[in-house]
Amino acid sequence: MIKTIDVGLQYGGRPLFSHADLVFSPGNCYGIIGANGAGKSTFLKILSGELEPDRGEVIRDPKERVSVLKQDHFLYDDYTVTDTVLHGNEELCEILRQKEELYAKEEMTEEEGMRLCELEERFAEMDGWSAESDAEILLNDLGIPPALHTARMETLPGDMKVKVLLAQALFGHPDILLMDEPTNHLDLETIAWLENFLLDLDDTTVIIVSHDRHFLNKVCTHIVDVDFGKITTVVGNYDFWYEYTQIRQRQIREQNKKAEAKIRELTEFIARFSANASKSKQATSRKKLLDNISLEDEGVSSRRFPFVDFKPDREIGKDVLVVDSLSKTIDGKKILDKVSFTVRPHDKIAFIGDDPVARTTLFRILSGELEPDEGSYKWGVTTSFSYFPSDNASYFEGCEDSLVDWVRNYSNLVYESDVRSWLGRLLFSGDEVHKKASVLSGGERVRMMLCKMMLSGANVLILDEPTNHLDLESIAALNEGLIRFPEVLLFTSHDHQFVQTVSNRIIDVTAGRFHDMQITYDEYIEQKLRKE
Ligand SMILES: Nc1ncnc2c1ncn2[C@@H]1O[C@H](COP(=O)(O)OP(=O)(O)O)[C@@H](O)[C@H]1O
Ligand SMILES: [Mg+2]
């Protein structure tokens, strides 16, 4: 259990949150949500003890073991994979180390012998003998084969490292588990695995920052919202929280409307009759009434929803795209192996599976960035596409243009006022529109790319992981925009709800091969689970 009492923190005079009185209990899973920069990561650091709050205190039982998902992907580079996982439990590792040291001695003093006994006792208590096999089971479950368990972390590709660090955080039943956006670098299947793993924990206090709506809905028993300079908890999952806050806000607005009407009526009465001797008593009592009415202050939410809507300039005819036997080998590895498929009008195809390189390679070929080794593809004459690459660095790095000029480069817009109004829809306002494109954050770059796509008037949108750097509000806005899009979509994403609600066709890319299915994502997952 963790308790916060009157916790508050501010940076540079700006309070992120104040008076946070919260209790986090075992067996529950808390999803921390809030806009970019609201203070979610900061709050998690306060809970873990990494950061001291300006005021208030955090109460934790010192006997309880806290496990935090490590954000630094290079921290364990010198360790083997299994050792990295074991380091999820530092006390256990320390006991192992001390035991080894003592056993290596030729002779032990009586004191050292006693110490060894204590260590062995604690080791047994912690189920130390099965630690290594537990670690290996976790790794296998996450798709890291035994051959790699003795490899050094440094030699692992990025996506595998992420999984090892996840195994480390989950290792050995921590009492308290803290994770900051764990689904960010995970593929859809691993996210599904993590969801089930967390659902099976029954006495851990789990606290997770996330902007993955499906994840929040599936695993969370409570939603902790960082907004309006406060931290508030609602019992329920994300959808429940959303409904609840909508209703609550409507109620506050209606109450305020009524209160305002009453205030007007009383003020008028007082103004008219306070000088009137026969009515002055009534006026005075109304003055008292007036003093007791207060409006509930809604505060200013830090949540902002961008406007995302793609309007194609023209409708697509019957020919969209024919892909015929495409093959591509990169660095000696066959990435695409005789891939063929035909895209029909109104297809919204999600490319999924455990091979992100194959998907990105396909999109790069289709958008003309890369040549195939063999095979061909043909776009229909009525099509025009706009491409959102998974790596957009070339559009921004070293780019000295202001945001206004950047948009001008990629559109027919001339007048600054027109460009500004588009930038405003994507939440860039005031002087911000004059900052350089090269300084933008990951999420800001994505919003600029979406602006470019909206202005393109394309009738085919190719999107490679557009949800990666976005906050929940932007994902929701993009999600709605793409549901409304009337023409053709080819996309990838690891946001479950996004894939489920946008696509009407799934192409699973595994080992260079394509499996084409006219089903929803939930149906696909169900099929897959049945096969396993
Ligand atoms: N060490 C720091 N000094 C000053 N400001 C900081 C520091 N750390 C974070 N901030 C600011 O505090 C705000 C909240 O940051 P953070 O908790 O990372 O947000 P979130 O995780 O909700 O996106 C941001 O505006 C950030 O720039
Ligand atoms: Mg954060």
Image (cartoon, helix red, strand yellow):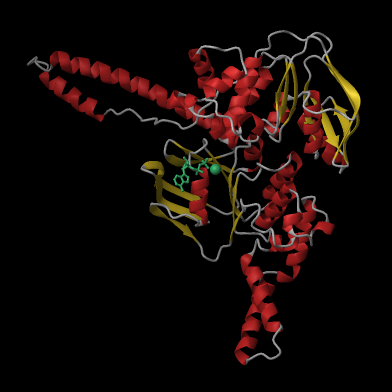
Q: In which quarter of the image is residue 482?
A: top right
Instruction: Give the image quarter of residue 242.
Output: top right
Q: Which of 179 and 357 is in front in this view?
A: 357
Q: Which of 439 and 479 is in front in this view?
A: 439
Can residue 65 be seen? yes
Query: Residue 312 appears in which quarter of the rendering?
Result: top right
Q: Nearer the viewer, residue 363 or 241?
A: 363
> Would residue 467 be seen by someone viewing this image from the given angle?
no
Residue 73, position in %: x, y?
A: 65, 52
Residue drawn at x 28%, y 27% as measured from the top left: 293
Indicate the position of residue 494 as horizontal and vertical percent values: 71, 36
Horizontal relation, residue 302 to residue 123: left or right: left
Q: Which quadrant is home to the C terminus? A: top right
Classify 530 as above or below 262. below
- x and y percentages locating residue 18 in the rendered image: 39, 44
Q: Nearer the viewer, residue 96 or 292?
A: 96
Residue 417 image offset from top left, x and y in percent: 48, 14
Q: Is residue 121 above or below residue 347?
A: below
Residue at 69% over, 44% down: 195
Tell me the residue at 63%/91% (across/down).
109
